[in-house]
Amino acid sequence: MVKVALLGASGGVGQVGFPPRPLSLLLKMSPMIDVLALYGRRMIDGIMTDLSHIPMGPRVVGYTPLNDGLEHALTDCDIVLVCVGLSLVPNFVSRNDLLTANAPIVGELIEACARYCPAACICMISNPMNSLVPLAAAILKAHKVFDPRKLLGVMTLDTNRAEVFLAETCGYRDPTPVLIPIVGGHSAETMAPLFSQTVPLMAISEEQIDELIMRVQHGGREVFFAKGKEGTATLSTAWAAARLVAKVCRAMKGASDQMESVYVSLGRIKGGIEIATRVGVAFFSVPVVFGPEGVKEVLNPFKKINASERELVASCAESLQVDIQAGIDIFRKDFRDRETPDVSG
């Protein structure tokens, strides 16, 4: 039986807020999930009842902070989606402000995961992901339950955009057969889509590659301004998260061909040390293969990259180190009552 918890399930559905409501609908449609646990501070009964009228998919249960709701939502979970806090609004909210606002909320939920579902695969959607994943790793290490194979920063939205934009450039109607490694982090300054490594390889010019990289890096801004500055990328984020959950579920059930780019702690994952040594940071988005216990191995995307991509990756890693340190600093500042763990990866 597969149980999935969606933390922050009462978030926004349309123009504002995070994407849990459309995400809860997509998860309800999954034949691979047996129980879907919704957790949030408001409207949970209504969302749960609404979803329960759909004649397919998992049984839906809902909880609020009352009556130990978080414990009930997380107990026996296999996958936890952390989708809480403020959204990043381009040009209006800085990532530092976002970290200050969201770190206490995310930290509390990760502590609960450590207590009630220490073996669950935790998928981080909340931003700033570059800092919140290292924060989560530090908290889990303090509780002595950290498994780097099971803490994933969801980079799938960036992957989706790269696939769609490349298909548009090349004139393909269906982007799904194209695989594009997304390395680095989840921000314009730290993200490096490696279009030279597409599978199958696409014949595109360097000028087109530069344009595609810029568009993927600033995809959130494109949606924000298309919505008249009144909303962020909620629907595409929800679809991306559901895509990742489906791949993790298939791998849990024995599929051996499930791959995706995710932001992970590299140090103790097969193939991770080689990547960490090359880029000089402990957390990095890389293409991985999933197994029954989360990430099975890291795939090295750097063997055939070109000179401009090497320069881009180096710049991304340098910026990413600042974000990683910010998450570690939050742990040391706001979780000082716990022993500071080794956060090197």
Image (cartoon, rainbow, N blue to C red):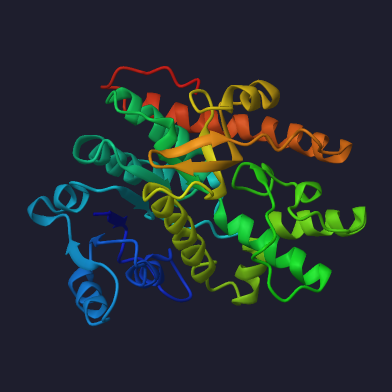
Q: In terms of image quadrants, where is residue 204?
A: bottom right
Residue at 46% from the left image edge and 27% from the top image edge? 328
Q: In terms of image quadrants, where is residue 89?
A: bottom right
Q: How many numbered discs?
A: 0
Q: Nearer the viewer, residue 220 or 60?
A: 60
Residue at 26% from the left image edge and 81% from the top image edge? 55
In this view, 137 is above or below 1: above
Q: Say whether residue 91 is visible.
A: no
Q: In terms of image quadrants, where is residue 6?
A: bottom left
Residue 320: percent from left, percent from top: 62, 34
Q: Nearer the viewer, residue 116 or 14?
A: 116
Residue 222: percent from left, percent from top: 67, 67
Q: Is residue 69 left or right of residue 153?
A: left
Q: Is residue 211 left or right of residue 72?
A: right
Q: Is residue 138 left or right of residue 196?
A: left
Residue at 37% from the left image edge and 51% from the top image edge? 253
Residue 12: percent from left, percent from top: 39, 70
Residue 160: percent from left, percent from top: 62, 61
Q: Say whether residue 216 is visible.
A: yes
